[in-house]
Image: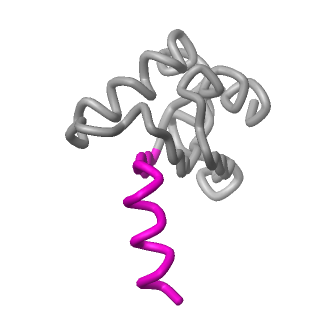
Amino acid sequence: MVTIIRQRLAALLPNRLQVIDDSARHAGHAGAKGGGGHYRLLIVSDAFAGLGRLARHRLVHAALGDLMHTRIHALSIQALTPAEYSATASIAS
């Protein structure tokens, strides 16, 4: 599933893409029982320039398409521009 997510998000031309499958941590959860996974996502792309948080999330959801209604139950999204990512990376170091 992580590979499929990565393939779909390639449409946003990410500079950095990290997909973490947290599904095992949610075993027994109603959404997990139905087959939907839980994922965390860090995506860095110029496609997010000038967009607010909601618009960025909409772009990600659109790229994932039908997966959002079938195979993905929960998705935590961190969507940044390259400049924002560089700024947060320099703060952390």
Q: From the image, which quarter does the N terminus lie in?
A: top right
Return the x and y of residue 69 as percentages of the image width and height: 48, 16
Return the x and y of residue 11 as percentages of the image width and height: 59, 20
- Horizontal arrangement in the rendering, residue 57 relative to residue 5 (left or right): left
Q: Chief secondary structure of the magenta span?
A: helix
- Horizontal arrangement in the rendering, residue 76 relative to residue 38 (left or right): left
Residue found at the very far bottom of the displayed protein: 93
Residue found at the very far top of the displayed protein: 66
What residue is shown at x 64% (from left), y 20% (from top)? 8
Between residue 72 and residue 15, name the one nearer to us. Answer: 15
In the image, the segment drawn in magenta is 76-93
Q: Does residue 16 sit above or below 30 in this rendering?
A: below
What residue is shown at x 43% (from left), y 51% (from top)? 78
Return the x and y of residue 76 as percentages of the image width and height: 45, 48
What residue is shown at x 34% (from left), y 33% (from top)? 57
For residue 64, what is the image quadrant? top right
